Image (cartoon, rainbow, N blue to C red):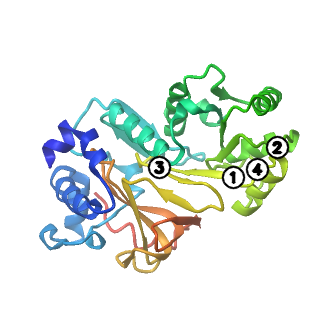
Amino acid sequence: MGYIFHQQPVNYINSINTQNFDENALEVFKYQYANNAIYGAYVDALKVDPKTVINVEQIPFIPISFFKTHKVVCGSFRDAKRIFRSSTTTGDTPSEHYIQSLDLYDHILMHGFEQFYGRPEDYVIMALLPSYLERNDASLVYMAEKLINASKNAESGFYLDEFQQIFEKLKHFETIGQTVLLLGVTFALLDFVDQYQVPLTNTIVMETGGMKGRRKEMIREDVHRHIQNALGVSKVHSEYGMTELLSQAYSKGDGIFQPMNTMKLFTRNINDPFEINSSGSGCLNIIDLANIHSCSFIATDDIGQIYQDGSFEVLGRADSSALRGCNLMVL
């Protein structure tokens, strides 16, 4: 399997499906235990014998905070093609994700988008990401840029606060029947609809989260209702991704996300981080098999609900007290 990971990663990703996901996850676990020094040390610190791990629920998940304090990579590659960093508040340490293969990242991105939305060429893609555009290391900006380029439409592009221009273009696209994807960080979408209202029937509005102190915090239902009322859309879509992941999940409404075929989610008990369940509520653990050069088994800080069909909701973020069972080791 190591040969496939390093030499044929795209073929490996394309081969993953519901039937073979767990088998692949166990192979990736063995590979990353042997080749990722940080992850291997974490597994050893938990006194887990890899030979005894025979189902995915037994695989240890590293706390996502490790991406802030360690270089989480398989092997010791020094020439990362890209380093994605998370946004931070003042004084906070960003997470860093070292990307060995941008070709693999690009393939995963398009693979996931096409799984849920079809070809990017069918859309005008307008990205309203003002705060993220100030940084050149945000994975969300890279993702949006790739989708914009893949759309091959001269009207696709990034926008800061050109709300009048966005308004006029959306009206024009409605007139000619052009399908649009308006992808925006939450506070920017709210700023836009506070100033402009236009009924949209050919536009998908997708929010990516993020208030970052720019507006008063609102629950998802209120955010979506506000956007729906201003733009006349029946649903507000959402994208779930993070710096530490390569795969994405998408919601086509009501905050219910469907993961792409390289992802699987579990919940962990807030009071016992080693109690893992495939459904129910708790902190979210994610297997991302696209993270073959990093770590595929991540215990996030998100609290969510997982349903029997594998779809999930994100209900909020855990505070430090809820995460007390995670930080078990200092390397």
- Identify the residue at horizontal 74%, vertical 56% (top origin): 224
Q: Look at label 2 and name its amino acid.
A: Val
Question: How many residues crowd around disc 2 within 10 Å: few (fewer than 14), some, or many (20 or more)?
Answer: some
Camera-side mark, 2 or 1:
1
Q: Secondary structure at mark 4?
A: loop
Q: Quadrant of the image for the C terminus?
A: bottom left
User: Residue 233 bears which disc, if any?
Assistant: 4
- Identify the residue at horizontal 45%, vertical 67% (top origin): 310
Q: Look at label 1 and name its amino acid.
A: Val
Q: Earlier in the sequence, mark 4 or mark 2?
A: 2
Q: Earlier in the sequence, mark 4 or mark 3?
A: 4
| Residue 127 in the image, given as x and y percentages of width and height | 64, 34
Q: Secondary structure at mark 3?
A: loop
Q: Are marks 1 and 4 in contact (CB under 8 Å)?
A: yes
Nearest the camera: 30 or 10? 10
Image mark count? 4
Residue at the spot of label 2: 193
Question: How many residues crowd around disc 1 within 10 Å: few (fewer than 14), some, or many (20 or more)?
Answer: many
Q: Are marks 3 and 1 in contact (CB under 8 Å)?
A: no
